[in-house]
Image (tube, rainbow, N blue to C red):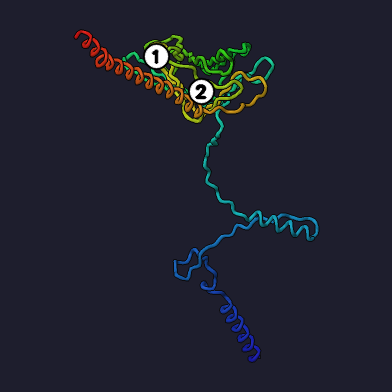
Amino acid sequence: MALRTFSKEIFYLWCLLGTVFSIPSSTSFPQKSDDRPFTTTRKSKVLFDMPALPKIKSPMTVENLEQLRSTTATSTTITLPKSTTTQRAISEEQPLYRLNSSNGRACILLQVDSVVDITFRTTLGEEETVSVYIPSDATVTGNCDDENLVTMSLKWKAFILSWSFAKTPGRERWYVDKIELTFNSSDRYFQLIDQPNKTMRLSTDKKHSAMLFPTPVGKSYACSQETVIPLTDGKMTARLLLRAMKLQPFKFKTNDFATEYNCDTLNARASRDETAPVAVGSTLAAAVLLTITGYAGYRYFIVKKVKYDTME
């Protein structure tokens, strides 16, 4: 009986000791890495945002596997923002203005980049110059009914630029007979102008300017250089600047420019035309001077001596 009681006490003691040693200590619980103080052994936190894979209901086949690879590769592609640069498209072609005749074909073609510099006097007594660009969408009107005289007008806002073309008496050449700029002085370009609310007309001066751009009929006038055409009404002045110009009136066959007659050829010919009169005039003057000098010498040495001998 005593042995059984001792054995039971040993059993209870054994169970008690087993329970005590089986309780985990506070140091055995895992701690979050963020709660521990900073040490050199602390691992950095790395987060991965894994893309969700598409659900494929059908059994895994070769096609489904390729689709899965393609989708995964596409979803994990990182697209970096690209820098945007606004670039202005530069066209080498100049604005083209076309006037059609009654049959629908081109009658006048004008291709040019042009601007008008207008100088006016303000109410303060000062001169001011404004630059007015002729837009490419200007309205083109005119008249091509006459075989020897045609006109074309470019209209935009408060401005009208009119061109008059004519032929020489022999109809071998065409030329610009007149250029006229019409505008209203109340336009926003002419603030403080001393002549407000008036219709101004500035044109080429026929008295001081020859025929403009004389060109053989059937050819187009072309000039890559900048051409300056002065305009005036007697008080106000302006300059019409024409850049990279092609011009041809009196067209009746095609809608394109004909063979070019370059302004370099025209300038060279004008230079020759100016040189010839100078050379002829200089030669004639020299001949007259020599004739007068010879005659004076003849009178002095020959005629005078004959009269003196006769008197003796």
Residue at the disc numbered 2? 134
Amino acid at circle 1: Met
Q: Is residue 63 above or below residue 223?
A: below
Residue 217 visible within the image: yes
Residue sitting at x 63%, y 11%: 145
Count numbered badges in the picture: 2
Q: Position of residue 268 (x, y in %)?
A: 47, 28
Q: Position of residue 197 (x, y in %)?
A: 43, 9
Residue sitting at x 52%, y 39%: 87
Residue 158 visible within the image: no
Amino acid at circle 2: Ile
Residue sitting at x 53%, y 28%: 262
Q: Secondary structure at mark 1?
A: loop
Calculate the distance from the C-alpha at mark 1 to the C-alpha at mark 2: 19 Å
Looking at this view, is 263 or 152 the one in front? Answer: 263
Q: Is residue 8 above or below residue 298?
A: below
As drawn, the label of residue 236 is 1
